[in-house]
Image (tube, rainbow, N blue to C red):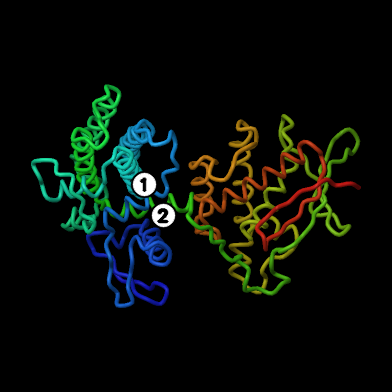
Amino acid sequence: MIGPLMGCVWIVPVSYFDPEQDSLNWANRVTEGRRRNRGIVTAGMDGSFTPLTVTAYADQAAKTDRGVEGQSLAFPLLGLFGETGSLLSALKKKQRDRASSAAYSDAVAEELGDVLWYLAAIARRGGLSLSAIAAHLYRKDEQWLNQDDATLTFEALQPHTIVRTAAPLPQFEETLLALAAEVGAMVADHQNAALVPGGEALARRLTNVFKLLLKASREAGLTLEGAAVKNQHKILGRWPEEKIYPAAPDADKDSDEQLPRQMAIEVFEKSVGDRPFVFQRCNELFIGDRLTDNAHEADDYRFHDVFHYAFVAVLGWSPVVRSLLRLKRKSDAKLDETEDGARAILIEEGISTWVFSMARPLDYFRDMKAGELPLDLLKQVHQFVQGYEPQDYPLWLWEEAILQGYEAFRFLQEHRRGLVTIDFENRQLRIEPLTS
């Protein structure tokens, strides 16, 4: 499989990905990102492909271990147990809904990667290296030697072509049940204080889990390397080592078709008759319609336009604001119809409404810091925008936009008025008291 990559060429062995697989898109983007940023998988100028080593994956996984419960084994063991259950859940959904092939494959790849991450965390916190576990399997040693092999790759562990199928092999279910049983036994050993850090008992348990994980991925028609790369793409997209902000989607357009880079909007509540409305004003001109909550019970959603302003300030994207300010990109008929059209506007409004429903029971994300928004929430937002300009924006960027928007929203809840400032150059949405 050959394709363009930043003026170079990347090659993926046929045993890794099926050309017909929809989810190949993420592999393409991950390969490019790793080549440019972290070198997990690299594509050389000569078209060569550097497979992922177990050591390289474990090193990257260590950087994304946020140290929950210090270096205790309890947290990653619970995580391993939970992700194994998620694998079984994905299989159950596939058996129930046979039309979910594409979504199922993607879900299994993600869960396999998550299981591998927790496996690496248990090994590291338990005083062992994942590469020593893998090398023990690769060499088929009878005795535990605790010998690393920094050059051992996932490809070497799965050297044969893995055929992509519409459904997993029949024995996949049995393998997942065996994996669950092995993980359960490891949790029980931990509870009984039978897992000594650096000890052979822990090493044996981890070896058994790794072996079953390789078997499960093969029976699912996937490679464990593909799952590992996808896992790192997700984790680094959520908790990056370095934040690199993407350019605004309209950076190449004239200023009269660009969203504002700097803008101040007065937002205030005012009663008309016996009903409160929210008005918005910029440069003495009112923006949009007066707003209510549009709900049976008052919840202050009338202030929700600050979420769209946050998208402008942090993402450089908002079909809603583009429509309000009449900044649609009329010079490009395709963009005008798709990215700036009614469907894109509905998608953004859908994100705003859905996140609001998630935020309300969490006190509108009060006291939440970067890295603390629920991962599933951010993944769902990411899914909303697939096929549109912000589809490749990392999860951390969405989190910044959401948290800044809700900080402004809580201010307006308390004060009922404020001066909102969009500052795209600094990727900030600021709010301060509105005095008049």
Q: Quadrant of residue 345?
A: bottom right
How far, Cα to Cα, is label 2 from label 1?
Answer: 10 Å
**Which numbered tag is attached to residue 4?**
none
- Above or below, 46 relative to 133: below
Q: Nearer the viewer, residue 172 or 182?
A: 182
Residue at 69% over, 64% down? 259
Quadrant location of the N terminus?
bottom left
**Closer to the eye: label 2 or 1:** 2
Residue type at mark 1: give it.
Glu
Viewed as shown, does residue 298 lie left or right of 219? right
Q: Nearer the viewer, residue 202 or 243?
A: 202
Q: Quadrant of residue 206?
A: top left
Residue at 60% over, 33% down? 362
Residue at 68% over, 51% down? 308
Residue under pointer 1 = 110
Q: Earlier in the sequence, mark 2 or mark 1?
A: 1
Viewed as shown, does residue 67 lie left or right of 40? right
Residue type at mark 2: give it.
His
Q: Position of residue 395 (x, y in %)?
A: 51, 51
Cβ–Cβ under 8 Å for marks 2 and 1: no
State the SS at label 2. helix
Residue under pointer 2 = 233
